[in-house]
């Protein structure tokens, strides 16, 4: 089944262009109104007084190419169908629409279809008396022996340099020469762990071509198989794998580095990869970083590419010049991580460890129970939540059990013990569970210290947990077992409290809707007959205390 949002496959490119133009921040883009099969985006403010810079190619690489149209970059972008070169007629119409006496430069990625269609359009335009030059970008170094390297993400840097030269009023020859010089100092290499999904395609075999735990090095921006397979998904190792051949090509010199998201990598991962790049063998040569961001993507491909441009003063000026585009990313002067010195605040309780055999026995029973329940609670939570309740409770229990074994707890000072347990759970337990349990034990410890008896102090802890957490009895959370247990415990009968906890946990299985907590985000059909894992944990702990 296709993994793609779309309405009409035949209208996909037209619809996408409309959405892109509507959202353009400068309001300076228009679509050329001609044949419906021609998709050309042009500058609305263009007056033909300078050299026009035109690029394009198949759609699916957004923001390329329409996202680079605007003052300081492209004059027009010719958009083909998905991964398909635009027609000769489309390119020719774009040339005629924006080219004045100064002429135009075509910037073309080195794919056969693009070369042929843009090339023939250029020759036809010359018959109209227009001055047209074409520059072919071939920055991909994945196949060192390839006589026709592909044009990939580095093309965006050529757009920027040529666009700046044209904006400065340079001649067609000068704009062309600047673009050619950029091509001669530009190298790119990409990697992916999953290729892209095409809209309307039901074939998942190609999308799953790359085995788990592996990545393909040098695959094309249309999903073409890579040059080799690397048996790792380690971010540092992959950056090193890309940097080594890129650096061998670039040699010594100041560099602008583009880190390009091929479409399907999360922002978190791109930030991590940027960090690895900052500590790689390139670190002493990076003058500017562009991205991380999608500039020349490949639909939803789970991958990224690096492009290196060896700088000179003209390139540096061009890259940093302002533009009015949707997709360009302003370069950032590269510098190591900055930090602000700060003395950490530790809100910790001062206490003296002490012994108490009875308390130790209860504590060992409770922590041992939660540790043993880890897999069972995770399995329950996988049905009604996010599958980590058992691990979260076990993590807190292991920490307390370790402190117990190391004789570091104030076992003979119950108020202090509850406060310490609350402090440790806030530190080692993740998610909301750790905070809620910390509130419970901390409030109970403070109440016990103020003179309340233990049963009443525990109810105080429950009240504070309910106040801050927002859940109440009947909301299908651990409170459904904990509240009846603690209310019953006011008589001092812990066995009756354990029975009440079990009854409360069992009742959650028949609650068709959760009012709070992890299960409130789950459809009621998934909850039917499944007890809340937090409530089960409470019931099992009380049962362990009376064994």
Image (cartoon, rainbow, N blue to C red):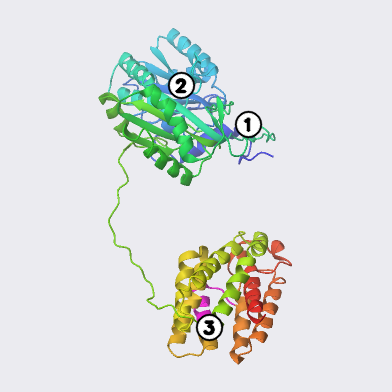
Quarter of the N terminus within the rendering: top right
Looking at the image, which residue sits at the far right? Answer: 529
Above or below: residue 518 compared with residue 237? below
* Region in magenta: 460-472
> Which residue is under mark 3?
458
> Which residue is under mark 2?
94
Q: CA distance from mark 2 to mark 3?
A: 76 Å
Question: Is 11 left or right of 343, judged from the image as shown?
Answer: right
Q: Main secondary structure of the magenta part?
A: helix
Q: Position of residue 95 (x, y in %)?
A: 44, 18
Residue 18 covered by magenta stretch = no
Q: Marks 1 and 3: which is nearer the front? A: 3
> Which residue is under mark 1?
10
Q: CA distance from mark 1 to mark 3?
A: 65 Å
Residue 463 covered by magenta stretch = yes
Badge 3: residue crowd in 10 Å (few <14, some 14–19, many ≥20): many
């Amino acid at each position: 089944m296709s993994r793609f949002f779309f309405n009409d496959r035949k209208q996909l490119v037209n619809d996408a262009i409309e959405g892109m133009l509507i959202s353009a921040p400068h309001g300076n883009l228009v679509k050329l109104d001609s044949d419906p099969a021609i998709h050309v985006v042009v500058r609305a403010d263009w007056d033909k007084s300078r050299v026009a810079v035109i690029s394009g190619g198949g759609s699916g690489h957004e923001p390329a190419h329409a996202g680079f149209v605007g003052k300081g970059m492209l004059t027009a972008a010719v958009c083909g169908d998905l991964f398909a070169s635009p027609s000769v007629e489309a390119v020719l119409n774009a040339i005629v629409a924006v080219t004045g006496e100064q002429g135009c430069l075509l910037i073309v990625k080195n794919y056969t279809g693009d070369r042929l269609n843009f090339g023939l359009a250029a020759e036809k335009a010359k018959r109209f008396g227009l001055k047209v030059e074409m520059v072919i970008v071939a920055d991909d170094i994945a196949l060192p022996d390839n006589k026709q390297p592909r044009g990939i993400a580095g093309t965006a840097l050529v757009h920027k340099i040529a666009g700046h030269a044209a904006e400065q009023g340079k001649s067609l020859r000068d704009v062309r020469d600047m673009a050619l010089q950029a091509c001669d100092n530009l190298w790119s290499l990409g990697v992916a762990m999953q290729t892209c999904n095409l809209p309307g395609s039901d074939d998942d075999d190609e999308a799953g071509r790359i085995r788990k735990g592996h990545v393909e090095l040098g695959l094309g921006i249309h999903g073409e198989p890579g040059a080799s397979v690397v048996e790792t998904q380690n971010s540092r190792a992959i950056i090193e794998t890309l940097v080594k051949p890129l650096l061998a090509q670039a040699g010594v010199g100041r560099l602008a580095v583009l880190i390009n998201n091929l479409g399907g990598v999360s922002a978190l991962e791109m930030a991590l990869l940027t960090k690895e790049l900052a500590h790689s063998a390139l670190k002493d040569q990076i003058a500017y970083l562009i991205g991380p961001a999608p500039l020349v993507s490949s639909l939803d491909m789970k991958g990224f590419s690096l492009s290196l441009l060896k700088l000179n003063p003209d390139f540096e000026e061009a890259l940093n010049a302002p533009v009015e585009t949707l997709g360009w990313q302003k370069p950032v002067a590269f510098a190591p991580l900055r930090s602000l010195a700060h003395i950490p605040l530790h809100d910790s309780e001062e206490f003296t460890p002490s012994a108490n055999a009875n308390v130790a026995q209860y504590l060992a029973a409770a922590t041992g129970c939660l540790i043993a329940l880890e897999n069972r609670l995770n399995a329950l939570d996988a049905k009604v939540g996010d599958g980590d309740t058992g691990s979260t409770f076990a993590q807190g229990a292991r920490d307390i059990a370790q402190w117990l074994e190391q004789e570091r707890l104030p076992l003979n000072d119950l108020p202090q013990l509850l406060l310490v347990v609350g402090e440790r759970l806030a530190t080692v337990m993740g998610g909301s569970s750790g905070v809620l349990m910390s509130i419970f034990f901390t409030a109970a410890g403070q109440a016990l210290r103020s003179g309340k008896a233990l049963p009443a102090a525990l109810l105080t802890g429950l009240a504070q947990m309910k106040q801050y957490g927002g859940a109440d009895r009947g909301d299908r959370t651990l409170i459904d077992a904990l509240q009846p247990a603690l209310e019953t415990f006011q008589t001092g009968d812990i066995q009756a409290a354990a029975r009440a906890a079990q009854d409360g946990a069992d009742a959650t299985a028949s609650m068709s809707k959760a009012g709070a907590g992890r299960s409130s985000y789950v459809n009621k059909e998934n909850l039917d007959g499944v007890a809340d894992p937090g409530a089960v944990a409470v019931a099992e702990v009380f049962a362990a205390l009376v064994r």
